[in-house]
Amino acid sequence: MSDIQIAQQATMQEVSQLAEQRLGLAPQHLEPYGRYKAKVSLDVMTEMADRPDGKLILVTAISPTPAGEGKTTTTIGLSDALNRIGKQSLVCVREPSMGPCFGLKGGAAGGGYAQVVPMEDINLHFTGDFHAIASAHNLLAAMIDNHIHHGNELQLDARKIAWQRVVDMNDRALRDIVVGMGGTANGFLRQDRFDIVVASEVMAIFCLSNSLHELKQRLGDILIGYSTDGTPRYAHEIKAHGAMAALLKEALKPNLVQTLENNPAFVHGGPFANIAHGCNSVVSTKMALKLSDYVVTEAGFGADLGAEKFINIKCRKAGIKPDMAVVVATVKALKYHGGLALKELAEENLGALQAGLANLQKHLDNLQQEFGLRCVVAINHFVQDSDEEIALIENAVKQMGAEAILARHWAEGGAGAEALAHKVVAMLEQDSTACDFLYPDEMGLWDKIGEVAKRLYGADQVVAEKKVLDKIAMLNEQHGSMPVCMAKTPYSFSSDAALRGAASNHTLTVRDVRLSHGAGFVVVLCGDVMTMPGLPKRPAAERIDIDDDGTITGLF
Amino acid sequence: MSDIQIAQQATMQEVSQLAEQRLGLAPQHLEPYGRYKAKVSLDVMTEMADRPDGKLILVTAISPTPAGEGKTTTTIGLSDALNRIGKQSLVCVREPSMGPCFGLKGGAAGGGYAQVVPMEDINLHFTGDFHAIASAHNLLAAMIDNHIHHGNELQLDARKIAWQRVVDMNDRALRDIVVGMGGTANGFLRQDRFDIVVASEVMAIFCLSNSLHELKQRLGDILIGYSTDGTPRYAHEIKAHGAMAALLKEALKPNLVQTLENNPAFVHGGPFANIAHGCNSVVSTKMALKLSDYVVTEAGFGADLGAEKFINIKCRKAGIKPDMAVVVATVKALKYHGGLALKELAEENLGALQAGLANLQKHLDNLQQEFGLRCVVAINHFVQDSDEEIALIENAVKQMGAEAILARHWAEGGAGAEALAHKVVAMLEQDSTACDFLYPDEMGLWDKIGEVAKRLYGADQVVAEKKVLDKIAMLNEQHGSMPVCMAKTPYSFSSDAALRGAASNHTLTVRDVRLSHGAGFVVVLCGDVMTMPGLPKRPAAERIDIDDDGTITGLF
C-alpha cells in the first residue's frame, strides 16, 4: 500500500480528546482546525512554566544519500514505540513545504506505518502557517518597493536591496527576474528573485522565536538593504514589523496532530536546512517539553549539518539541550557510502558496507566526543537487508562505543521500534553530563567556521577569497557574537558532494557569507545554495488528483 | 470607537452552537477553525436537496463614489434586522482580500455596528481560502513554464502564454516583470506579471462552481496559451487540474461566522468585480438558501455592474434568481452625483441632491423594468444628513415607483434597520414574477454587449476597433453562448468615470475582450482594468500592530 492509502485507512481520534487525554490540555487552550488538527495557545507556556522539562531526544542521521535514511519515520516510529512501552512521548517534526509535494518528493509526513495524519492536510496548506509566513515576507517586499516609489526617504539603494520575494512552489522561472517594468506607475526597475517560502528568513525567525514579543522584535531587525551611503536599513525603519507579526499571530501557535497510532505530534515550522537551521519551531519544542516526559524531534540533513545547527543555533537561542541522540543509518545508504552505485544497493555486499561505516563512525565521534552527547544508532530496516549485514553494523557500532538497534517501524509501526525505545529509556535513566556547544558566543566568526570545519567536517584548512575574508571581518565587528549557519552540501563531510564516506584532510572553501540579522545568525556559504527548486519533467502534480467525494490520490 | 474596537468588544457565540441552534447543522457537518469560524461540509447540499429554497435578497447600490455607500454594512444590518423581527436570515458576503487591508482600505468585514466577526481573522488569512486559490493558480503557472523548459511537447508559444501569476498583496513592482533570467537552468526568458489573487480566474471558477466535480472540470478548461501554430491549449493538457482541485478541496466549503449580533453569516469567495463577476461563491449562496428562510447577499460596485453580473453570470450558472433587490443610496453620494465636490458633501444641498437622484432613478429603472426585479431603496444614514434631504429622497423614490427606507444599522446595528426589514418581508410576501436575464445564451457576444450597453448603461452605440471586432467574431464561433463579463469604470454609467449622475447618449468603446474559458465568460474591457493595486505613500500596514498578548490594532 502507498503511504497515502495507509494514511487514509487510519482511525483518527478527535484532536480535542487527544489533547485532553494525552497532554492534559483544557479546551480553552485549543483552537481546532477541523476535527483532527488544532493549534495550541501559547498561554500554556506561561501556565506551565514551573513544570520540569521532559527528556529531549534528537533524531539525526548519517550523511544523506539517494537511498534514503528515514529520519522522519524513525522519529515518529520511536515516539510511537515509547508510548507503546508505557512512556508518555510527544513527537516534534517540521511542516512539509508544498512546493516539493508537487515536484519529486511527494509528501513529507513520514512514511509506511510511521506517519503523522491527516496526511493530505499536513502536506497541503495544513493550518496555513507557511502561507502566513509567505504573506509576512511579501508584505515587507511590497513595502520596500513602495518606499522607494514614494520618495525613498531612507535613500535605499535599489541595487542593494537584501530582501527578495517568496512563494511556496518549485518555480525555476522565478529564480532570477526583473521587476518594476512598465513605466513610472510601476516603480523602479530592478533585478529580484523569488525563493521558496522555507528559505525565507521569516521562516527562520518564526522557528527561533520564544514568544510573540521576540518574533516581532526579530522581524523588525531584518536587514532590508543599504542606503546609498552604505548605511544598513532594517524592517522596523519602514514600520513593517507590526503588520508582519500580526500576520503571524495564529501561525506561531504549535500545531497538534497525531501519529497513525493515535499518539500526539507537534508539526510546526520548517526552515530550509541549508541557508537556515532546518529544525521545527522553538515554541513547539519547548511546549512539548512541558507537556510530555519524552520529546522526540529531528533536524535536517546528516548530523554534520542538522545536529550541529540544532545544538549550536536552535538550542543556544532557545536555552534547551538534547539529552541524547538517535543516529539513523540504513544498510543501503552505508553501502552507498562504501562506494556502490545505486543499482547495486539491493545485493548483499559486506565489503562496501564495512567501508561505508566510516561515515557513521565520524558522525558518532562528532556527537559523542565533540558535543558530549549520548548516542544510539537506529538501523532503519529495509526488506532487502541481510542478517549478515545487520550483524556487521551491530558489531562495528559496538567498537565505536555505542549500540545499534534494528528498527522496523516503517513496516510495523511503533511495535517495530520497541527495542529502540527500551534502549533509549535505559540510556536516559543513567546520569549524564549535558551536551556542549561547539563554540562560545564570544569566539570570532572566522574561528567559529574553523571549529566546525576542522572538528566536525575533518577539514585541514578553511580558505576564502580576500573579499569574503573582508566581509567576514566587517560582519565580525557588529555581529561577531552570532552563531554561524553553515550551508554546504549534505552529501559529504567536505564541500564536494562526490566524496562519500568520511572525507578528511580536505579544504573547505567559504564562497560567501550572508547576514540573517533578524534570525540572528551569519550564513556561511560553502558551495552553491539553491533557494528555489524546480519541478522535474514529470512532476508529482501530474499524478495528484481528487475524486467527486473529495478523496485525494497521488500524494505519496 | 473604531471598527476594530467595536469588533473586539463583541461577545461571540461558539460556532458549533451557532450552527446547531440557528441552522440545524449537526456536528459532523462542521469543521471548526478555531472557536468562532467553521467550514460547512458540502454534504449538506446533498442531504437537504429536497428542502425548499429561502428568499434571496440582493443588496446592490447606486454608482459608487468616494463618499461611500455602505453596501456591505447594509447587507449585514438588514440580516440582523430580519433576525430581530423574528425571521430566520443568513447573510452571504465576500471574503476580504488581504492586499487592500495593508493599503488604503483597511478591513472589509462591514463597519460600525454592522460587522461580521472575528474581524481580524476574517481580514487576515481567515480560513486560508485565498491562499489555496493562489497556490492552485501558481501551481499551474509553474507547470506551464516547467512544460516549456522540459521539451515543450505542446509547442507552447512563450509569447502567447495566457496565464500569469498571483499574490495576495498590493505590489505594483510585480505588474510587469521578466522571468526566466539567469541562463538555461532557469527556463526561457519571457515577459510576465503578477495579479492580485482576487483577479485570478481560479477565484472566479471557485465562486461559480456548483460542486467539486464542476470545479475540477472548469480548472481543466482554463486556457493557458497557444501553440506556435495557434492551437489553444488548456490546463488539462498539462495535467494540472487534479492537483489544483486537490489544493481547493477544503477551501470550497463555505465559511460560517457570525455578525456582531450573533446571527449566522457565510463569508466565502471574493472575485474582483471588474475582470470577474464580483459575487460571493455559488456554493455558499445555494447552501444558505437551503438553511435559511431569508438570505441577504450583495454584489460588487453599483447595480449597472454588480447586479447585472450577479444575475446574468452568477444566477445563470447557479440556476438561482433573486427575489428582490435592496438599492443602497446615501445623501452624500447622491449629492456627489449631483455635481458637488467631496468637501461640500457635509452641508445640506437639496438642489444637488435632486440632480443626483438621476443616478438612483436609472438604477431603479434598470432593475425594475429591464430585469423585472422588485426593489426597495435603503438610505444608509450618516449623521450629517438633514431631515429635508431624507424627505426629498423618500418623495422622489415614491415617484420612481418604489419606496425608500431610512436605515441606521451603522450606528445602531440591526435595530436601526428594522423598518427596512419589515418592508422587505412585506414585499416578499406578495406574489411576483421571477426576474429575467437581460439576454439569452444563444444571443451573439456582440449583441450581448449591445444589450447591456444600451438598455442598462444608456449608451447610444457600442464601438470597437477592427481587430477587436475580429477577435469578438472569432470568440463568438466557439464561445458565443457564454455570458459577457463587463469591465468598465464603476463610477459612471458610461466608460468615462467623470460623467456622474445618469450619463446617457454616450458611446461605449470596447477596448479588448479576453476569454475566461474555465470560468465560462468573455471579459469585455471598456477602459483600463487594474489587476494589481499599489500601496499608498503611507500604507495602512504601517499602523497595524500587535501587542505581546496578541491583540491587533490598526485594522479599521
Image: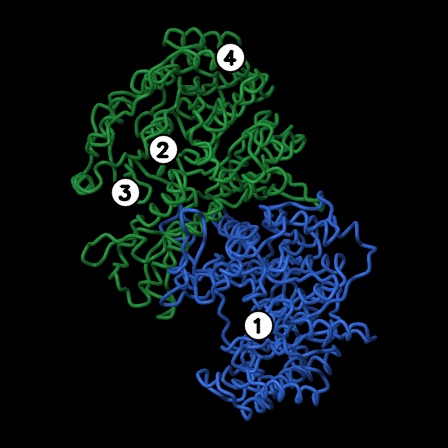
Chain colours: A green, B blue
Residue type, label 1: Gly
Residue type, label 4: His
Q: What element carries label 4?
A: helix
How far apart are the alpha carbons under marks 4 and 3? 43 Å
Residue type, label 2: Ala
Residue, disc 2: A318
Residue, disc 3: A514
Circle nearer the viewer, 4 or 3 = 4
Give the image quarter of residue A208: top left
Give the image quarter of residue A12: top right
Q: Which chain carries label 3?
A: A
Residue, disc 1: B70
Circle nearer the viewer, 1 or 3 = 1
Give left or right: position of B543 versus A161.
right
Q: Is mark 2 on a helix, strand or loop?
A: helix
Residue type, label 3: Arg
Circle nearer the viewer, 1 or 4 = 1
Q: Where is residue A438 in the image (x, y as percent from the top left)?
A: 27, 25
| Residue A508 to residue A233: above or below | above
N-terminal-most mark, 4 or 3: 4
